[in-house]
């Protein structure tokens, strides 16, 4: 099956590579795009011939449903290059499955696994020179699907586009990370789309996040929409807190993205003997622990964020600093997960995926 798809992919190579214009020593996050993109259209009830074409603009009718009703889902992945120039992905099938979970919730068609995987592999092999080897850099991969069909009727589109675009990228966060625990606005609600990686989930966060940025924070930590007492996740990552020597993270639900980094960190931490609790964690518990000194760490976990230690959090007009630890769990866990991702260590969990 997979061979059939790769044989079908029509490839049109660019005549004007932009590769020599890129400063690989100073890569921003997600702002430089590679020469090609994978595109597959869904029309007449089925996925059409997949293509790899030069990276370019997309032309859509102003009535396209993506503009009005927001049917749009995406994924975030990374490709890593090791010292022998071999290319690796991290648990890509999890992303492929999650894209379809998101698509289903938004009444969009599912993309067959072989289209996703073969499209991705063929694109990465074509773009292999774009995968950075500079420290903390990787090729960020953005698979996404949106409603390309026309009409103002508020109903699911008939047509969709699935695209994979890539961006050689440096770290997502630069410098200090201060987060604000939010109790007024909500990111998601029971029965809603919070678990989906849907564009609208991010749009809804931008205004409260802008208010937080104006106060000097970089990210919002969302609390549950019913009581606003338990922390859930941040705008672009799942959240872990360490109280004494126990690592705690909120359980996934309708409202939280089931992060691939999150579940990998839970497994790695347990594997190295760290006690991990997956349970509700109240703001009250975090603030009390910050006050009595038992709150040792807080960090975000995500593909873009990797593991991002939180320096301070704000809650109800007050800031709480986190201690600076030399051998923090965040440092240890980041080393372990990135060593697997960049093929610098053994992969006892079988998460690494060779692209060849
Ligand atoms: N939560 C949100 C809202 C995200 O956008 C992300 C990023 O993808 C995550 C969590 C972390 O998920 P993953 O580790 O699969 O990248
Ligand atoms: C990712 O970590 O890949 C994400 O999709 C987060 C995004 C908001 C940059």
Image (cartoon, rainbow, N blue to C red):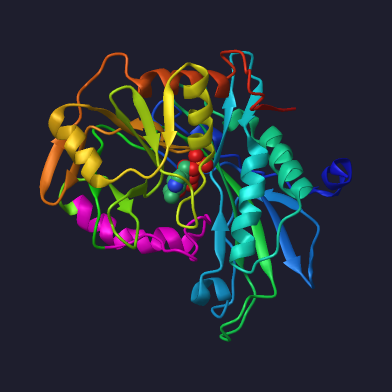
Q: Position of residue 26 (x, y in %)?
A: 38, 30
Q: Quadrant of residue 77?
A: top right
Q: Is residue 275 magenta?
A: no
Task: Compare residues 1 and 249 and report the one nearer the observer.
Answer: 249
Which quarter of the image is occupied by the N terminus? Answer: top right
Q: Nearer the viewer, residue 266 or 161?
A: 266
- In the picture, measured across the screen, residue 75 lies left or right of residue 284, that is right
- Residue 343 image offset from top left, x and y in percent: 59, 18
* Residue 198 colored in magenta in the image: yes
Q: Is residue 130 left or right of residue 216?
A: right
| Residue at left offset 42%, top offset 33% | 277
The residue furthest bottom is 153
What is the span of residues highlighted in magenta in the rendered image?
Answer: 185-213
Residue lying farthest to the left in this orientation: 318
Q: Which of these two is toward me, 21 or 49?
A: 49
Q: Is there any visible trace of residue 36 in the rendered image?
A: no
Q: Is residue 353 above or below residue 74?
A: above
Give me the residue at 41% from left, 61% from top.
Answer: 188
- For residue 299, what is the image quadrant? top left
């Amino acid at each position: 099956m997979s061979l059939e798809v790769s044989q079908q992919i029509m490839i049109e190579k660019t005549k004007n590579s932009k590769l020599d214009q890129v400063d690989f020593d100073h890569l921003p996050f997600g702002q430089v795009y590679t020469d090609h993109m994978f595109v597959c259209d869904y029309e007449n009830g089925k996925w059409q011939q997949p293509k790899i074409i030069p990276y370019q603009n997309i032309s859509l009718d102003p009535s396209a449903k993506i503009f009005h009703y927001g049917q749009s889902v995406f994924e975030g992945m990374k490709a890593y290059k090791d010292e022998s120039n071999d290319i690796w992905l991290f648990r890509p099938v999890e992303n492929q499955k999650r894209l379809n979970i998101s698509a289903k919730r938004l009444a969009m068609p599912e993309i067959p696994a072989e289209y996703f995987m073969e499209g991705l592999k063929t694109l990465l092999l074509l773009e292999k020179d774009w995968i950075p080897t500079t420290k903390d850099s990787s090729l960020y991969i953005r698979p996404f699907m949106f409603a390309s069909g026309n009409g103002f009727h508020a109903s699911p589109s008939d047509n969709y586009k699935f695209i994979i675009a890539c961006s050689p990228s440096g770290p997502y966060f630069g410098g200090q990370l201060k987060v604000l625990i939010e109790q007024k606005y909500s990111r998601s609600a029971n029965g809603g789309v919070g678990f989906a990686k849907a564009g609208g989930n991010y749009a809804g966060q931008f205004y409260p996040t802008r208010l937080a940025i104006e106060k000097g924070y970089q990210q919002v930590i969302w609390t549950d929409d019913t009581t606003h007492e338990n922390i859930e996740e941040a705008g672009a990552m799942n959240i872990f807190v360490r109280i004494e020597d126990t690592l705690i993270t909120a359980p996934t639900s309708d409202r939280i993205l089931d992060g691939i980094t999150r579940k990998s960190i839970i497994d790695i931490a347990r594997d190295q003997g760290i006690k991990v609790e997956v349970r509700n964690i109240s703001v009250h518990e975090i603030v009390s622990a910050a006050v009595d000194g038992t709150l040792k760490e807080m960090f975000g976990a995500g593909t873009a964020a990797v593991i991002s230690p939180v320096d301070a959090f704000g809650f109800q007009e007050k800031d709480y600093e986190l201690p600076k630890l030399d051998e923090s769990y965040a440092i240890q866990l980041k080393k372990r997960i990135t060593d697997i991702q960049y093929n610098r260590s053994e992969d006892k969990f079988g998460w690494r995926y060779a692209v060849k």
